[in-house]
Each structure stands twice: as C-alpha cells, then as structure tokens.
Image (spheres, helix red, strand yellow):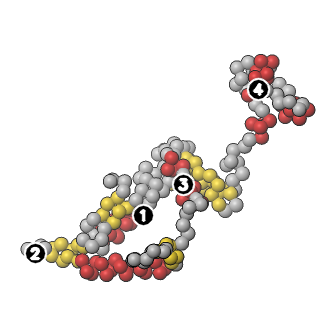
Amino acid sequence: MPNLRAMSERRSLPIWPLMRQLRGPDHLGLADAARSPQTEAVQARTDDADAVVGSICPFCAVGCAQRIFVKDGEVSHVEGDPDSPVSRGRLCARGSSTKELVAGPARQYHVRYRPPGGRDWQDLDLDTAMDMIADRIVETREETWQDRTPEGSPLNRTMGFGSLGGAALDNEENYLMKKLFTALGAVQIENQARI
C-alpha cells in the first residue's frame, strides 16, 4: 500500500478508511486500511519519560507494583508493573489515580488548622503542628490514664484517644500507627479497611 502520509499531503480530501479497505488488499480493515496520518502520528505518553521508577501502590494491603514515569522531575504517568507477581500489571481505579496524590490540583501542601471555636483556617508550619499534636496526646494520656481496675487488677490503658488508620496510608504507616498507639496505652485502635 502506498505511503498514506504522502498521499494525504498531495490531496485535499482525506483518504477514507472504508475506501482503502474496499480498494486495497486489506478487505477486513485490520492492517493498513485502518491506518491514517493521525494514528501514525500518535505516540504513547510514556515514550518521552526521563525515567521509570518502580513503586508499590499506597492505597491498600494488596501491594500492587507500579511503574512511575517521570518527566522533568515530575510524575507524568502511573501504570501497573507487568513483572509483578501480585498484580501482573493491573491496577484498580484507586491505584490508577496515584498520580493525583502527588500532583493533583486539590493537594494541600500546608498544614491547615482551625482553632477551637474558630471560623477560619490557618496555615501552620509542620513543626508547630507536630508539637501541638504531641502536647495534646501527652496531656490527654495523663488526664485519662487508668492504672488499675477498682478490684486492683492491672489495666495500663487510656480511653482518652484512639486511632483509625486509613486505606490511603500504606501498610508500613498503619503498622507504625498500631505500634505507637499500643505503646501509648490506647485501646481503640482500628483500621478503615476492616470497618
């Protein structure tokens, strides 16, 4: 079959796929008859990536492997890793949206805080926010600590706070949260994936 791009440049009318199918050897329209200058010019959006980085999906406990395509220092595309024995190149809808966690327009880059009784949100630096959280945990633990039952049996717990892990956190983060809150004496420790 002649070069389609050269033919379309010589003519002002498009070469319709149906006409190529009827006139040419590809009567089923499975090869050259289905090609056009537009489809010839199309390339995969991952072709121009500077690097491909292996990663694991952060959403749930399955651990699907991902290929992260990076262009100019930013994530340009995320897809499943076909070499993974877990997911074999597949990602669910949430896994496919991993790019939005990093580069989404709604992502917050500052700690947002609304004081008790306040109406407006304030931006805080991370160190200030972490200090506020730590102070409140220590204070609540001291105020609500239960050393023993009324009968004298050991309790060593607090009912003043708990932890709810989320599926947006990865396994390691949820594991560390469980260990931290257990060490602090919390009893109410749960994960959103179980609820």
Please report whichever mark, 4 or 1, sits nearer to the chain's N-terminal start: 4
Q: Is residue 36 above or below residue 165?
A: above
Q: Residues within 10 Å of mark 4 (few under 14, many from 20)?
A: some
Q: Position of residue 14 (x, y in %)?
A: 83, 30
Q: Residues within 10 Å of mark 2 (few under 14, many from 20)?
A: few
Q: Which residue is mark 2?
A: 150
What's under tag 4, amino acid-wise?
Answer: Pro
At numbered mark 2, what does the secondary structure look like: helix, strand or loop?
loop
Please report whichever mark, 4 or 3, sits nearer to the chain's N-terminal start: 4
What's under tag 2, amino acid-wise?
Answer: Pro
Tag shown at residue 98: 3
- Residue 45 lies left or right of residue 36; in this view the side is left
Mark closer to the observer (4, 2): 4
Q: Quadrant of residue 159?
A: bottom left
Give the CA separation, mark 4 to mark 3.
38 Å
At numbered mark 4, what does the secondary structure look like: helix, strand or loop?
helix
Please report whichever mark, 1 or 2, sits nearer to the chain's N-terminal start: 2
Mark closer to the observer (1, 3): 3
Marks 1 and 2: CB-CB under 8 Å?
no
- Residue depicted at 52% across the width and 76% down the height: 123
- Residue 122 lies left or right of residue 61; in this view the side is right
Give the CA separation, mark 3 to mark 2.
50 Å
Q: Nearer the viewer, residue 12 or 98?
A: 12
Q: Is residue 42 above or below residue 62?
A: above
What's under tag 1, amino acid-wise?
Answer: Glu
Give the CA separation, mark 1 to mark 3.
17 Å
Give the CA separation, mark 4 to mark 1.
54 Å
Q: How many marks?
A: 4
Q: Which residue is mark 4?
A: 17
Q: Nearer the viewer, residue 113 or 71?
A: 113
What's under tag 3, amino acid-wise?
Answer: Thr
Tag shown at residue 173: 1
